[in-house]
Image (cartoon, rainbow, N blue to C red):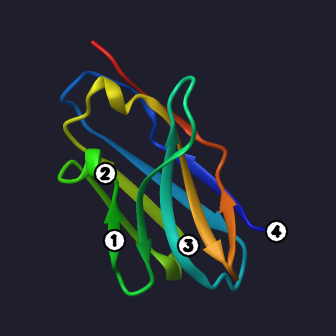
Amino acid sequence: QVQLVESGGGLVQPGGSLRLSCAASGSGLNIAAMAWYRQAPGGQREFVANMFVGGKTYYEDSVKGRFTISGASAKNTVSLQMNSLNEDDTAVYYCQIVVGGLPYWGQGTQVTVSS
């Protein structure tokens, strides 16, 4: 059973920073990719960033230059450093890992950007 636990969400003022972390439990995980998604109030879950084994990363256009995904598949961890946050970044953030071709999701962590 693969379980993911996220942490690091909270309330931050516009222009501020937060770092989200996600740890996956389970032995012998062969993680192919790690990602972050988000879902704003009333919206659909959308892609934010991902990282493949070997280090290749991709970002949604609105977060490029502001967010950085990092992770260690060997340690079953993935993080998202978020800088220059604005109110449009307010959402529940979910981490995802892909193991054996299957996606596994965390429970989500709330990020609220507000003055």
Q: Quadrant of the N terminus?
A: bottom right
* Residue bearing the label numbered 4: 1
Which residue shows up at 69% across the image and 86% down it?
Answer: 28
Q: Which labelled disc corresponds to residue 57?
A: 1
* Residue bearing the label numbered 2: 81
Mark 1 and mark 3 lie on one chain; the one further toward the N terminus is 1
Mark 3 and mark 2 lie on one chain; the one further toward the N terminus is 3
* Residue bearing the label numbered 3: 76
Q: At which x and y percent is residue 87?
A: 31, 23
Tell me the CA gap for discs 4 and 3. Answer: 14 Å
Residue 42 lies, with reference to residue 104, above or below; the image says above
- Quarter of the rendering containing residue 26: bottom right
Tell me the CA gap for discs 1 and 2. Answer: 14 Å
Type of amino acid under label 4? Gln
Q: Nearer the viewer, mark 1 or mark 3?
A: 1
Type of amino acid under label 3? Asn
